[in-house]
Amino acid sequence: MSYTLVIGNKNYSSWSMRAWLLMRLAEVDFAETVVPLYESGSRKAVEDLGGETGLVPVLIDDGIPIWDTLAITETLQEANPVIWPCDPDRRARARSYAGEVHSSLNPLRNAMPVNTRGRNRLPAIDDDVRADIARVCAIWATAGSYADGPWLFGQFCAADIMFAPVAARFQTYAIEPTPEASSYYQMLLAHPWVVEWFAAGQAEESVIPIFELPERG
């Protein structure tokens, strides 16, 4: 199989991060095509590569484009079933968590744009954002409850990957998770693939001003 992953800036693109981590989890070789975001022609460039929405990520699988992260997840699962837990009950819950991240957490996402190299940035936090933070911490606090192992379902899987950019947001905006969620949060930030992604973002020179919130005073 031949894979090419179309992604945006590694410092700023949360969904690109998820797709890239999924490729590492699937243990497949792939080429990367980076389309800098929020520049003139960015969406057209993604469309020309097969992403019909103009959004990243896009996985090109033997010439066939797949342009949604959950669709990419299931495509990789079909080729190499290591993406989700083997147990059907755990797999159902893991997919539910992934779907929840995919379709919700919008207040948190809007208040705290991903900026993996940023630190001590100041977000606008209202009750909706606090509710999202509480929900995330409640999920993280379940790590190790459903299977032997430290991750949400024992072994590192797509559900954990879905939360990696959320952990990056917590780090950027100095959000302290609850004590019950803290161990999982720290473990997620320390995962070698996550660290590798952060380092790549740190090395980028591009700056997207709308994602550069001010530092705390």
Image: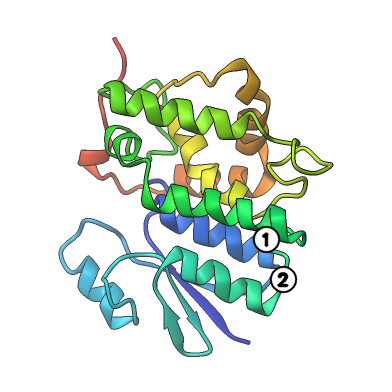
Q: CA distance from mark 2 to mark 1?
A: 7 Å
Q: Does the image show residue 171?
A: no
Residue sitting at x 61%, y 47%: 160
The kind of secondary structure element at disc 2 is: loop
Q: Is residue 15 above or below residue 74?
A: above
Give the numbered dot on residue 81. 2
Residue sitting at x 71%, y 68%: 27
Q: Hey, what amino acid is under mark 2? A: Pro
Screen quadrant of the N terminus: bottom right
| Rendering coords of residue 34 (x, y %) | 40, 66
The residue nearer to you, when weighing 211 against 183, is 183
| Rendering coords of residue 129 (x, y %) | 33, 28
**Image side of residue 185 versus residue 67, left or right:** right
Q: Which residue is mark 1?
A: 84
Within-10-Å neighbours for mark 2: few <14, some 14–19, many 20+: few
Q: Hey, what amino acid is under mark 1? A: Trp
Residue sitting at x 31%, y 60%: 36
**Image side of residue 107 versus residue 57, left or right:** left
The kind of secondary structure element at disc 1 is: loop
Residue sitting at x 43%, y 36%: 117
**Image side of residue 79 versus residue 165, left or right:** right
Q: Are marks 2 and 1 in contact (CB under 8 Å)?
A: yes
Q: Quadrant of residue 65?
A: bottom left
Within-10-Å neighbours for mark 1: few <14, some 14–19, many 20+: many
| Rendering coords of residue 23 (x, y %) | 60, 66
